[in-house]
Amino acid sequence: MEALELFHSSTLFKTLSLLSPLAFPKPPLPPSLFPPTLRSLSLSPRALSLPKRYFLPHCLSRSPHANLQQEEQGKVELEEEELEEFVEDEEEGDESKGEDFSDVDVDALEEEARYASLQYSSSLSCELRIEDEADDQSRRNQKRGRRKTTTTSIPDHLLPRVTIVGRPNVGKSALYNRLVGGNRAIVVDEPGVTRDRLYGRSFWGEHEFMVVDTGGVINISRSQTDVMEDLAITTTIGMDGISLASREAAVSRMPTMIEKQAALAVEEAAVIIFLVDGQAGLTAADEEIADWLRKNYSNKFVILAVNKCESPRKGMMQASEFWSFGFSPLPISALSGTGTGELLDLVCSGLQKIEGPENLEVEDYVPAIAIVGRPNVGKSSILNALVGEDRTIVSPISGTTRDAIDTEFTAPDGQKFRLIDTAGIRRRAAVASSGSMTETLSVNRAFRAIRRSDVVALVIEAVACITEQDCKIAERIEREGKGCLIVVNKWDTIPHKNQQTATYYEQDVREKLRVLDWAPIVYSTAIAGHSVEKIIVSASTVEKERSRRLGTSILNQVVREAVAFKSPPRTRGGKRGRVYYCTQAAIRPPTFVFFVNDAKLFSETYRRYMEKKLRSDAGFSGTPIRLLWRSRRKMEKDEGRAETMTQANLVARDRNLALAS
């Protein structure tokens, strides 16, 4: 024995042990060399075989010769605080490895997960809110009050139509907002703001109907300059690369297209509200619209409403000059609401009460698909190709679409969707420099359409490069938690296509839109109607994935396999993150809550790894997923059963909630 000790202390052994530590292991330290703190701990043999760096100061762990000399001399100084943390982490790891979830209060964890998901969604919604708090509260109150009064659930296509028609800038959109409640249509003191048809549900008493807002009708022959001034059309913004002849042709066609949309709305209307401006008085444009209504729609109930009559006494005088139109004028004020009650009484007198079918199935959830993108990428063309009619105006003039246009659509498989066409979203600096309040409100409507949608179709132009604005829109979609598909429109403009073109193009899109690397890509040519049906098929798949709920047992199995393949890295203090339990707390988007020992121990890199493993093993294509990491203290045991903390402790812990997406 003495000879062996002499050999270990010899220079030859030190040299050989450095060259081959496995062949010549170091002898274990005598118990007398351990400090009292270490000897007092009930350590297992595994704990006694801790790495040397947990027993020695950092300055001594660098040189093997110095370490051996210090061990032989018995002058080892342990970092007691670091050792205690490591031992506690090791004991906790041993418990977690053999932990049986049968003794865990799963219901309490599920409730805590739902609460964490709700809290995260609320905080994120506050950050992304566009409209001010007062407007949100007023719209919620109006909707709440209207919901209490409405007693029927008749689908939109069965309700009678009430169309508002008139020349530009007489207050049609303001009256529309007054009748449907809220701020649905853009109202600006500019002519030609509304161009497409807007639909909204309204009711009065026991009658329920659809109100249709239309663009201003211009029947008088005007010069191109006058038309551009009346409709606020510009031929410079967003029309780069378009020839001057094409611009002039588009400007000359714009009044005709607006009138066509208004004529379609009048054709389907049961009651027509002919709106005129009482302050401006009788004009030649009003006379032509009155003649048009009398000659072509004498079989319909027409109400002549004289707007901007805030004073009842002056209103009667202002309305008196419109008797020559052959209709009974009614003075009203769309902004203040004066006379709108009498107007609704007249409207309901010309409507027949619609009774819903007895076997009508109430649809609680109809997915909404918002079509967004930069100007002139073909959003309105896609909508028209899907519905099979000219629902919106398509023109090379930038900013043709102003409001968010909602349209009901039924897919070939019978699935119903609500399509939302939006205005082109330009850079914030470009919108601010233009000084156009209309464009600012249009962009806000587009962002609000993303918020109230379920799936977003991000449209990009095939021949155009992906810009920074496309990336910002993509980031907004991901933060809102909406399902998404990327639509590459105008695919026919790509020259010399072959079988590898789509593959190379997809690689380029994935590289530039990394935030949407999970979104499917669809190639289409909307103007010719090619492959537009693939948009609905892909959107339907994305919606199903977004609404899918993964079983808890399958989810925990996937998580265990991911942790076994790549365990969380240790910190410099020796601690390692451990996952105890995982559950899906919500859908739309799928939200997963991880109960861990300490959320701070999981780096952003490891969280991205866990998200990729969930996608590769469980799917969820086309939808963002949220991973929430919630620290969980040790379970308190009482009478041999594990009990969770009380609800008061859970609320206190929520202040230190560690969340990540």
Image: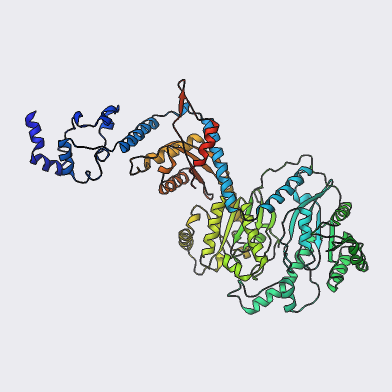
Identity of the residue furthest to the top in this view:
639
Q: Position of residue 512 (x, y in %)?
A: 47, 61
109 vs 44, left or right, is right
Answer above or below: position of 482 versus 95. Answer: below
Q: Position of residue 266 (x, y in %)?
A: 81, 61
The structure residue drawn at horizontal position 75% and vertical position 50%, both measured from the top left corner, is 156
Front residue of this view, candidates 611 and 140: 140
346 vs 394, left or right, is right
Please give the count of numbered marks on the rendered protein.
Answer: 0
Can residue 409 be seen from the camera position used here?
no
Front residue of this view, candidates 410 and 413: 410
Snapshot colouring? rainbow
- Place residue 78 in its image quadrant: top left
Identity of the residue furthest to the left in this view:
3
Answer above or below: position of 506 versus 568. Answer: below
Front residue of this view, candidates 273 and 526: 273
432 vs 11, left or right, is right
- Place residue 192 in its image quadrant: bottom right
State which quarter of the image contains the N terminus.
top left
Can residue 188 be seen from the camera position used here?
yes
Q: Position of residue 126 (x, y in %)?
A: 59, 50
The structure residue drawn at horizontal position 73% and vertical position 54%, both measured from the top left corner, is 182
Q: Position of residue 187 (x, y in %)?
A: 73, 62
